[in-house]
Amino acid sequence: MADDVVDRLGSVIAPEHRPQVELIIEQAVSEVVHHSGPLPHASELARYNDIDASFAERIVRMAEREQEQRHAKAVRLSEQEYALKSRGQHYALLLAVVILLFAGFLGHLGDTTMAGKVALGTLVGIVAAFVGGRAVEVADRKGRSEANE
């Protein structure tokens, strides 16, 4: 690369200074290659194959395994999240039924005011949990989508 530049500047550079100019140009000019992702550029893979014929294939296989691992992890996390939410809903339903039975028992004993408060408080709590849970879920989804952009 420096030779090309020096050849273009040949009429301006004295022949005795040519080696110093080439050195300066080589030091000043650098090539920066940026790449993202698990695989190097095709030219890099070809150079790896020059070292050992199996290197490029092994690198591609490694990237494929890594991708499979990431996908499997995402599926596992999704399944665990679903199971956790499902279990939480079952426990919430059981707890609500127990509290409402308790409110019914209070009503049977004659304390209808307290029974009404317990039942109303339970229902308000359940509604608030579901509405608040949905708001948090929507905000979390929105935050994740903004982070991915």
Image (spheres, rainbow, N blue to C red):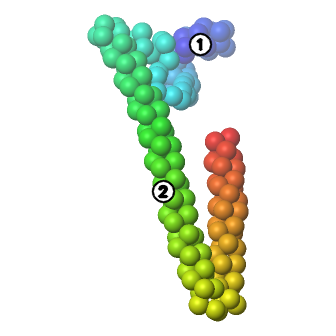
Looking at the rendered image, the disc whose residue lies closer to the viewer, 1 or 2, is 2
In terms of depth relative to the viewer, which is nearer, 28 or 88? Answer: 88
Nearer the observer, 102 or 42: 102
Position in image of residue 2 (x %, y %): 54, 16
Judge whether 34 appears above or below 95 on screen.
above
Give the alpha-carbon distance from disc 1 to disc 2, as whole Å.
Answer: 74 Å
Dot 1 surroundings within 10 Å: few (below 14), some, or many (20 or more)? some
The quadrant of the picture occupied by the N terminus is: top right
- Identify the amino acid type marked 1: Val
Quadrant of image for the C terminus: top right
Q: Position of residue 72 (x, y in %)?
A: 43, 34
Label 2 near label 1: C-beta < 8 Å? no
**Residue 116 shown left or right of residue 14 in the figure:** right
* Residue 148 marker: none
- Residue 6: mark: 1
Element type where label 2 sits in the image: helix
The residue beneath circle 2 is: 87
**Lower position in the chain sequence, tag 1 or tag 2:** 1
